[in-house]
Amino acid sequence: MQKVIVKDGDLNDAMKKFSRISAETRRAAQAHTYYLRPGLKKAEKSKQAQRRKFK
């Protein structure tokens, strides 16, 4: 498990780091939950990129 160390009492930065780490972990776990053909995987990846772009 990843650890986040709070330096100089800066809790906001520590929370941002923790949030980023947990999001990466969730994404990595979700990628292995089911199999997608390469073409569908590429389409799904493109769809996610569009969502992030226009969020």
Image: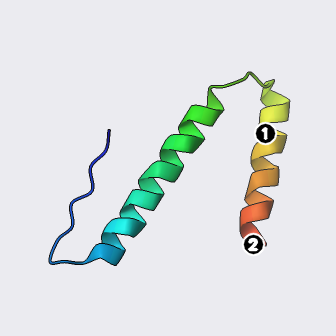
Instruction: Identify the image quadrant of the C terminus.
Output: bottom right
Residue indicated by mark 1? 42
Along the line of sight, the residue nearer the viewer: 16 or 38 = 16
Please tell me whether mark 2 or mark 1 is closer to you in this view. 2
Name which residue type carries label 2. Answer: Lys
The image quadrant that residue 36 belongs to is top right
Q: Residue at x 42, y 52 (%)?
A: 21
The image quadrant that residue 49 belongs to is bottom right
Q: Residue furthest left?
A: 8
Q: Is residue 17 above or below residue 33?
A: below
The disc at residue 14 is none
The disc at residue 55 is 2
Q: Is residue 27 above or below residue 6?
A: above
Q: Is residue 24 left or right of residue 8?
A: right
Where residue 1 appears, as percent x and y from the top left, is: 32, 38
Where residue 8 appears, as percent x and y from the top left, is: 14, 77
Where residue 51 appears, as percent x and y from the top left, is: 78, 62
Q: Is residue 7 left or right of residue 35?
A: left
Q: Is residue 35 left or right of residue 5?
A: right
Q: Is residue 53 above or below residue 35?
A: below
Q: Residues within 10 Å of mark 1 (few under 14, many from 20)?
A: few
Q: Is residue 14 above or below residue 43?
A: below
Q: Residue at x 53, y 51 (%)?
A: 23
Q: Secondary structure at mark 2?
A: loop
Name which residue type carries label 1. Answer: Lys
Q: How many marks?
A: 2
Q: Residues within 10 Å of mark 2 (few under 14, many from 20)?
A: few
Q: Earlier in the sequence, mark 2 or mark 1?
A: 1
User: Tags 2 and 1 in contact by the CB under 8 Å rule?
Assistant: no
Along the line of sight, the residue nearer the viewer: 21 or 9 = 9
Q: Secondary structure at mark 1?
A: helix
